[in-house]
Amino acid sequence: MRHAVTLLYAAAAALCAVALCATLWRGLDEPGIAAAFGCVIAVGEFARVRLPEADGGSRTVGPLGIAGALGYALLGEAGGEPTSHGVLQTVAVTVVASLCGLAPHVARGQPPPVDHSVRAVLGVGFAATCFQPLYNSGWLAGAFAPGPGYVLCLLGITLLTGACDALLTAALSAARAGWPFGPLLRDELRARLGIVPAIAATGAVIALAVAVAGLWALPVFCVPLLLTQFSFRRYASVRATYRQTIASLARATEVAGHTPQGHARRVARLSRAVGRELGLREPELTVLEYAALMHDIGQLSLVDPVPGGATQPLAPQEQRRIALLGGAVVRQTGVAPEVAVVVERQADPYREQPVAARVIRVVNAYEDLLARRPAERSAAGFPGVAPALDRLREDTERDYEPRVVEALARVVHGG
Amino acid sequence: MHGGGARLTRAARVTLACAVCAAVACAASTPGGPGGLRGVEWGVLLPLAALYALCEYAPRCPLLGPRVPGNVGAFFPVLLTAAVLLPPAAAALTPVPGALVGRARAHHPVARRVWHAAQLALAAWAAARVHGALSGQLADGAPLAFPAALPPAVAAALTLCAVTTALDGCMLVAAERCPPRLAWRGQFARSAGPHLAHGLAGLMMAVLWRSPYGPVAALLVLLPMYICCWVFAQYHRERAAHRATVRALVQAVDIKDRYTRGHSERVGRASALIARELGMDEARTEALRFAGILHDVGKLGVPTRLLRKEGPLTAEERRVIQLHPEYGNEMVRGIGFLGEARAAILHHHERMDGTGYPYGLSGSEIPPFARVVAVADAFDAMTSTRSYSRARPVGAALVELDRCAGSQFDPDVVRALRRALDREGWSPAATADLTEALEGPYGGSGGVGGGVRAASEPVP
């Protein structure tokens, strides 16, 4: 699978090289228009926003740069005059402008978003290849004289480009992580349901607006979008606040001496892995992770900490009371209500629980068994991983769902 | 009107009625003759009104609701397109159906919708009026040309913004008895940016509408603009997220120890009082409110038995309790937006003479936030009933604070507290929920109510 990545990179590099050479050889057609679109793309790329991700990493988004490049790829007329830039000039202008926009970030030591650039080059190449020959040959003007048909045609091309981009992203991550391609593609398409139509429409509108009103349309339409992209930082900050709050609450039980150091984080990491093994989708994995981080909050209500943070020995009503109090705290954090439900239902028999709560119950018990001191563990009869799993398998009547225990076993033995 | 389950105030009803009358008058008038809506392009008005209704209705629709980002606020680009393309009377009609079917908050939904419709109708009418005056008589169907079309569109957007914020302020004064000096503060500056952006988008829509590509092309503008509206609405979500954080931490402390919660709320309130008296701006006052509410979050690290112990503590037990500022700092150190408030959590037990804990800082080494929270904390500790001591009257507590000013407390802060209490009084009763403590009385959804106790009145 590894060579899929190499192949895509090579294709993008070849396209860039051909486009740049051809454009240098022939010179720019309509340099004013090229410069204006280049500015939009460069500014859009410069103003990329970094978003924290659920798995602790981050990705950057900059829809304006892509929309500007799409607009240039789909540009037929400009202010009523026909244009003649072809596919190769479109790609060349996009590449040079994105490099200009990204250069300051790379100079400040941030890693260059190579994947993103590769996808952008291939995507713009695709859109331009769909549109420019049709336009330059005059077929498009003949088939749909300026009117609604032309608009829908542009929108169709941009949407198709968005779908191809999702395909590329899924292929890249499948090749990297070795996960199956199908579910990744489904996750990608679902995650882009909102943003792809918006970017597609923006690209089409840029092309149409320049066709009608000339280059004036670029600042008029792009300034609001640029402002939006800047305020997108707010969205990033909201997400960061949620994550920080959850991390802080996860630390609270440790500070209070209810759970061992790092317990919540270990349970969260392992739960995520088990959830993935069970085939949960990304949003469900996020709920699972958040709930795992905060699953012990209710123990703060105990006057005396339970040794090792394991609530198993407590009476069922007491366990349920702790779970409900924990859920009440989680509700206040403003995260999705599903997370609070998972925390609240921790003490129920597994058949009545949401899947995430079953995973957390199993992983938590496994962690508790392993967290005991080695001497204690051998005295109790489970010195290692396999006996701990066996111990969980004994209790699949009420507490531990067999499917989850087996998924845990696969994760533990596989990693 | 924004208040809890209370009835609408008389002033609110009068304001509402006036707005509706004015809106009806606007929609019925046409400059240049009593022709009503004769000669209006229905082919433009009806699609725009339908579009606006769709935008407002989408978050309510059971089919679309979950997929549409909610809370985008009023969808202004469509209104501004109407202001550019239509005469004032028709522009005033555009938002009405949408406002009537849109989402409204639980209390007084009908009154809210009617108010929303009247407010937007007036704003759209004014915007169209301004646009018409600046662009001359735009002949029906004439193409809009850049850059001449730009200044009138910008003026229309600013007019829309001014009228909506002015009316919002009026209703805040009428329904919530918010003091006029607070009602309009900062509102226009905050919303002018988004309105300008929406104005340009509305202009773009109008240009495409009149172009050979027609309304279909104009519709495409809406998708990116919908995202814009959603992003601009994040300002409110950001504040909501901050409050949620504080609320969750308070709730965590609450399930451990019930007393701490009421105390935290009151210290937050007193800290904000002092902050305002010291002339701090809105953002720092809010940060100090958070600092006051969270100052004892480190009590989470202290064993519950110790917190509930009645009677004197041993030296060892006191040492354990004195660790709580450091526990608190450890807990919230990852929370970025708390900023200066974290210093207050760590240092609120320092004393001016350097004999406090945890670090024994003295005088100006102590962060200003910590000095404020220290006074607020001591004040509430004296004026509320604890397991081991009865509450003292506010006056006696202030005398005690004065006595310790200089050695334990910052004298400036103590004076500020005294001035603030003289003016606003102090109610030691904890609020029913944290909302009011977090948002302050005019924060938007907390009602203002309950008698404010005179400063010298003894506490029961």
Image (cartoon, coloured by chain):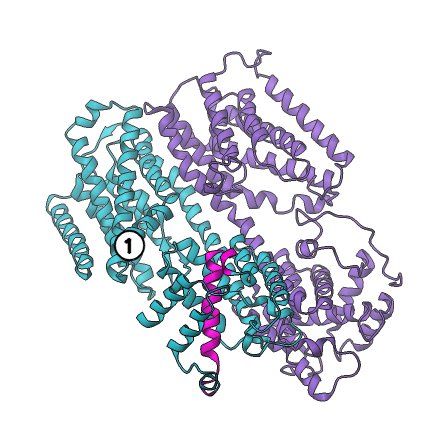
Chain colours: A cyan, B purple
Quadrant of the snapshot with the C terminus of chain A: bottom left
Q: In percent of the image, x 14 and y 44: which residue is there? A: A27
What residue sits 70% from the left and 57% below the top? B437
Q: Is residue A364 magenta?
A: yes
Residue stretch rendered in magenta on the structure: A350-375
As helix, strand or loop, the secondary structure at mark 1 comes to helix
| Disc 1 packing (10 Å; few <14; some 14–19; many ≥20) | some
Main SS, magenta residues: helix
Query: In the figure, B242 relative to B317: above or below?
Result: above
Residue B171 relative to residue B91: left or right: right
Q: Which residue is mark 1?
A: A116
Residue A34, image quadrant:
top left
Vertical comparison of A351 with B184: above or below: below
Q: Would you say residue A43 is visible in this rendering?
A: no
- The x and y percentages for residue A210 are 31, 33
- The answer to whether residue B350 is magenta is no
